[in-house]
Amino acid sequence: MTPTGTPPARRARDIGLDVRAPKTRCDDRHCPFHGRLPVRGQVLEGTVVSTAMQRTAVVERTLLHYVAKFERYEKRRRRYLAHAPPCLNVPVGHRVRIAETRPLSKLVSFCIVEDLGEAAHRVRGEEAVPAPGAPAPAEESP
Ligand SMILES: [Zn+2]
């Protein structure tokens, strides 16, 4: 649904996700808000670790994986290359939300859709992924 009362200067395309639209505009055609790039699929959260590339950022995500044999968690991490639209202008060290897109290049198939602010102490190991045999926190009825 299109919001009717939005001032024209702040209007960005509704990308279908519950995210804050960027305050500034851009003319990037791969921007989900001001271009024509559809986002669909996974939505992940991570920390920007590098912005050395042009309009592409390295987003690292850490998660805890349960090892049943040792009854402990191990840290795992994965790095995603994500398109960084110029209107968001995310610096290194910020938490971001990335959404899956069609492949934009050989290694880029995610796009940053929201800046969640500076990552304080939650850079590593905040998401637990239940593995088979792991003590599940709360089982839903089957
Ligand atoms: Zn934009």
Image: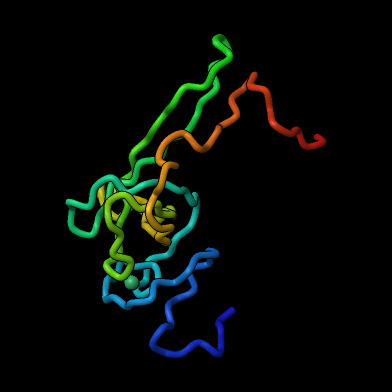
Residue 92 image position (x, y, % from top left): 27, 51
Q: Is residue 14 left or right of residue 119?
A: right
Q: In this view, does 52 lie above or below 84?
A: above
Q: Is residue 93 above or below residue 71?
A: below
Residue 38 image position (x, y, % from top left): 43, 64
Q: Is residue 46 above or below residue 64?
A: below
Residue at 77 percent of width and 37 percent of height: 140
Residue farthest toward the top in the current orientation of the protein: 69
Q: Quadrant for the N terminus, please.
A: bottom right
Residue 93 image position (x, y, % from top left): 31, 49
Residue farthest toward the front in the current orientation of the protein: 120
Ligand 1 resides in the quarter of the picture at bottom left
Q: Which of 83 and 118 is in front in this view?
A: 118
Q: Is residue 115 left or right of residue 127?
A: left
Scheme of colours in the image: rainbow
Residue at 69 percent of width and 31 percent of height: 137
Q: Nearer the viewer, residue 6 or 110?
A: 6
Q: Quadrant of residue 123?
A: top left
Residue 135 image position (x, y, % from top left): 67, 23
Q: Quadrant of residue 3?
A: bottom right
Q: In which quarter of the image is residue 97?
A: bottom left
Number of marks present in the image shown: 0
Residue at 36 percent of width and 75 percent of height: 34
Q: Which of 74 and 44 is in front in this view?
A: 74
Residue at 18 percent of width and 53 percent of height: 53
Q: In this view, does 18 lie to the left or right of 22?
A: right
Q: Quadrant for the C terminus, please.
A: top right
